[in-house]
């Protein structure tokens, strides 16, 4: 079997294509413009940056009248006078934590029970949910405590930002 011969027309087309591509190369593009600013504009920016970045050394201070932060005068001396309480008198509560500790001593819940899907903490005739408030009188002043949460054995109360957790029945907690 004979293989087909390329025709004269195909050979002529190939020769012309090679000749045109060798002589008729596309024109070169000019190089793209630079994104950098001219040298004189950059020099102004660099000079300003150097001027702003320069750090001057601070002048030395005489240390005769400077306070000593790690051992100030009067360090270790009691800041408020100590007042001894009379024997048998209850101690005064100063902060929220001490006050809350004293107030919780007056609160004794009876237990917890469920009413439908609600859990309630029993205080005699009052039944409270988490978020309810209890008013307690102490040293002639009323304090409003919030019942934060409770479970079967413990309850948590809040006064301002202080919280305290106590057992529902003291002495019965495992």
Image: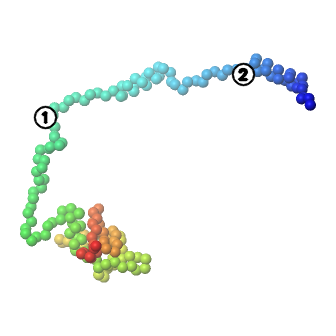
**Circle 1 is placed at which residue position?**
64
Pick the front one: 115 or 40: 115
Q: Quadrant of residue 114?
A: bottom left
Q: Is residue 12 visible in this depiction of the protein?
A: yes
| Residue furthest to the right | 1
- How far apart are the alpha carbons under marks 1 and 2? 83 Å
Q: Residue at left 63%, top 21%?
A: 30
Against 154, is 77 above or below?
above
In the rendered image, the quadrant that contains the N terminus is top right
Q: In this view, does 70 lie to the left or right of 130?
A: left
What residue sits right under mark 2 in the picture? 26
Spot occupied by residue 41 in the image (x, y as percentages of width and height): 47, 22
Residue 42, x across and y down, in percent: 46, 23
Measuring from the top left, give residue 81's x and y in whole percent: 9, 57
Q: Which element type, helix, strand or loop, lies under badge 1? A: loop
Figure coloring: rainbow
């Amino acid at each position: 079997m004979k293989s087909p011969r390329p025709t004269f027309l195909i050979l002529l087309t190939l020769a012309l294509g090679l000749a045109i591509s060798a002589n008729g190369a596309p024109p070169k593009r000019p190089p793209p413009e630079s994104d950098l600013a001219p040298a004189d504009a950059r020099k102004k920016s660099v000079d300003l940056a150097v001027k702003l970045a320069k750090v001057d050394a601070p002048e030395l201070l005489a240390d005769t009248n400077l306070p000593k932060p790690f051992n100030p005068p009067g360090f270790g001396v009691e800041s408020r006078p100590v007042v001894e309480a009379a024997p048998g008198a209850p101690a005064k509560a100063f902060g929220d934590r001490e006050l809350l500790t004293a107030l919780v001593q007056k609160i004794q819940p009876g237990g917890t029970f469920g009413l439908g899907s609600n859990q309630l903490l029993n205080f005699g005739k009052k039944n409270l949910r988490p978020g309810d408030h209890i008013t307690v009188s102490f040293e002639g002043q009323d304090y409003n405590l919030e019942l934060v949460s409770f479970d079967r054995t413990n309850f948590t109360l809040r006064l301002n930002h202080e919280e305290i957790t106590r057992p529902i029945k003291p002495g019965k907690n495992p």
